[in-house]
Amino acid sequence: MIAIGKNPLFCLKFNFMKLKELCNSLEEWAPLAYQESYDNSGLIVGDLSSELTGVLVSLDCIEEVIDEAIAKGCNVIVSHHPIVFKGLKTFTGNNYVERTVLKAIKNDIALYAIHTNLDNIHTGVNKMLADKIGLINTRVLVPKKEVIKQLVTYAMPADADSIRNALFEIGAGALGEYSECSFSVSGSGTFKGSGNSNPVVGEKGIRTCQIEERIEILFPAFMESKVISVLKSSHSYEEVAYSVFDISNENQNVGSGMIGELSVVENSLDFLGTLKNNLNAEGIRYTSLVKNKIKKVAICGGSGSFLLQAAIRSGADVFVTGDFKYHEFFDAENKIIIADVGHYESEQYTKDLIADFLSEKFPKFAVHLSKVNTNPINYL
């Protein structure tokens, strides 16, 4: 570690970590495959081989945040919201997006966004919001489908454990709170190698019948290439027989929103008052208090109106989120209380979540929380 200068703002910790290490860690936590189709999470500006001097974490990335990074000697900004959502055709500084990107490039500052992929993991944005509200027994409100695949392969009984262990090592076989999950059954397999083959058992040119184990393991769909690579490298067969199947099962740990319970039933007005205080909200827009008591709470950080019907079906007493439009409040249909706390207010603690993750992952590296209030909305 090398300290430069007497000004504490410029006492930088050099542990020679590269941007690629930072990106890899964030993407192991919140895989890019879990972002929504409209999103632009991941590295927006930067060279993966560059060495980092410090990380600044913010909710949004705007010009003032770039200035803050420069002042603190940080050459990477990790924000929740991407500064670029759509393709940029010009870089002339005509709007805040172009000016922010230009300033980052001019000052050699990398920009990384961890947005809907962080929304969609069960340890992400909504878990942070749930903790701030005081919810227990939380689960994903609308789990994602088509994000799980199944590997089926065959191996000699003596090799089965080593193959399973290699796949478990990279994260295959994880289901909710359980890991190293697989299924095996014994059977007989036949094969006949050509004259150019090099069989592990049997002889080339002669059909061989071999007792084998059929191994079945589920894995996240985005890991398919890695799973196949590890399978082949850990297998003793010259030609590895395997199949990969798409699974329609929901992944209970990946999806939109969250639902949980209060440890103690609260009066609806008391709940809203506590909610306002816990989230430092200037105000809460809410529908008729059709529920006198609040026990079950559905939430979604950011813009969550698309989850209203799911919240109703879940039996929640109240749905806490942001960005409801006027006419969407009528959709509550006296079945639930909508509590719109504001987009910024529902996600403001996300930067703490990200900073805590990075500080724990890289305890000897400089991680700073942005002090810039990026909320574009003001209240009288």
Image (cartoon, rainbow, N blue to C red):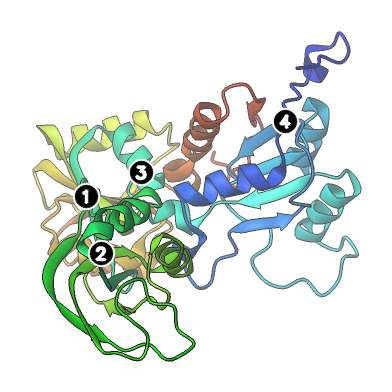
**Mark number, residue 217:** 2
What is the C-alpha distance between the residues marked 1 and 3?
10 Å
Depth check, mark 3 against mark 2: the one in front is 2
Percent across and percent down for residue 338 are 26, 54
Q: Earlier in the sequence, mark 1 or mark 2?
A: 1
Residue for badge 1 = 139
Q: What whole-number distance in Å separates the C-alpha atoms at marks 1 and 2? A: 24 Å
Residue 182 location, quadrant: bottom left
Front in this rendered view, residue 335 or 156? 156
Q: Quadrant of the C terminus?
A: top right
Neighbor class of circle 1 (other Cα within 10 Å; few <14, some 14-19, many 20+) is: some
Q: Earlier in the sequence, mark 3 or mark 2?
A: 3
Question: Amino acid type of disc 2?
Answer: Ile
Q: Are marks 1 and 2 in contact (CB under 8 Å)?
A: no
Residue at the image position 43 percent from the left and 74 percent from the top? 238
Q: Decide: is 326 above or below 77.
A: below
| Residue in the image at 74% along x and 21% along y | 13
- The residues tagged by marks 3 and 2 sit, at their Cα atoms, a distance apart of 24 Å
Residue type at mark 1: give it. Answer: Arg
Q: Quadrant of residue 197?
A: bottom left
Q: Amino acid at mark 4?
A: Gly
Q: Is residue 341 visible?
A: no
Q: Earlier in the sequence, mark 4 or mark 1?
A: 4
Q: Is residue 228 above or below residue 365?
A: below
The first of marks 4 and 3 along the sequence is 4
Residue 94 as seen in the image, left or right of residue 18: right
Is disc 3 placed on a helix, strand or loop? loop
Q: Is residue 234 above or below residue 18?
A: below
Q: Give residue 123's mark.
A: 3
Q: Considering the numbered disc 1 on the image, is that residue within a helix, a strand or a loop?
A: strand
